[in-house]
Image (tube, grey):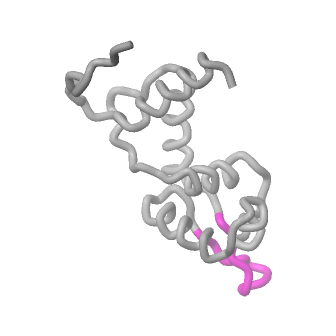
């Protein structure tokens, strides 16, 4: 990865942190993106297999993402034993804002708080 790619990623992450959106772990973000960017239906077992983690790990992440309204569980109408993980409009909106951070833009003014820019706590010296 080039230095400019890392700098772009850093700027995106700083924009995300400043946005006031909930801090998601890498695992939660990966799970969210898998559900939104890959064809479904998605199950806990299938998501665990794709991520290479256990089902309880996925369940914990889903509990957090569900509490935020970014994903939800839905019973299969054909086989009530199956539970699918499905997208929500809140999750789509969250990823849309995150995508703008990656593109170097910023979130719409209505969705981000106005934050004062703190002075650096230290100066980088060579």
Q: Eyeballing the image, is 90 above or below 111? A: below
The residues colored magenta run 73-85
Residue sticking out furthest to the front:
126
* Numbered circles on residues, count: 0
**Left or right: 112 as drawn, with respect to 107:** left
Q: Is residue 75 magenta?
A: yes
6 and 68: which is toward the camera: 6
Image quarter (top left, top right, bottom left or bottom right) of the N terminus: top right
68 and 90: which is toward the camera: 68
Question: Residue at image x 68%, y 73%?
Answer: 54
Question: Residue at image x 73%, y 86%?
Answer: 81
User: Percent x, y for residue 105?
Assistant: 48, 20
Q: Eyeballing the image, is 55 above or below 50? A: below
Q: Is residue 12 magenta?
A: no
**Left or right: 73 as drawn, with respect to 21:** right
Question: Residue at image x 78%, y 66%?
Answer: 49
Image quarter (top left, top right, bottom left or bottom right) of the C terminus: top left
Residue sticking out furthest to the top:
126
């Amino acid at each position: 990865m080039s230095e400019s790619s890392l700098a772009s990623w850093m700027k995106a992450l700083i924009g995300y942190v400043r946005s006031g959106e909930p801090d998601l772990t890498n695992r939660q973000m990966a799970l969210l993106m898998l559900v939104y960017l890959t064809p479904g239906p998605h199950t806990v077992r299938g998501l665990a297999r794709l991520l290479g983690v256990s089902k309880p790990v996925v369940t914990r992440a889903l509990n957090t993402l569900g509490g935020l309204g970014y994903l939800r569980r839905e019973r299969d109408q054909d086989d009530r034993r199956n539970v699918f993980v499905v997208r929500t409009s809140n999750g789509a909106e969250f990823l849309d804002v995150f995508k703008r951070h990656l593109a170097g833009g910023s979130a719409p003014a209505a969705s981000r708080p106005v934050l004062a820019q703190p002075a650096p706590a230290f100066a980088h010296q060579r």
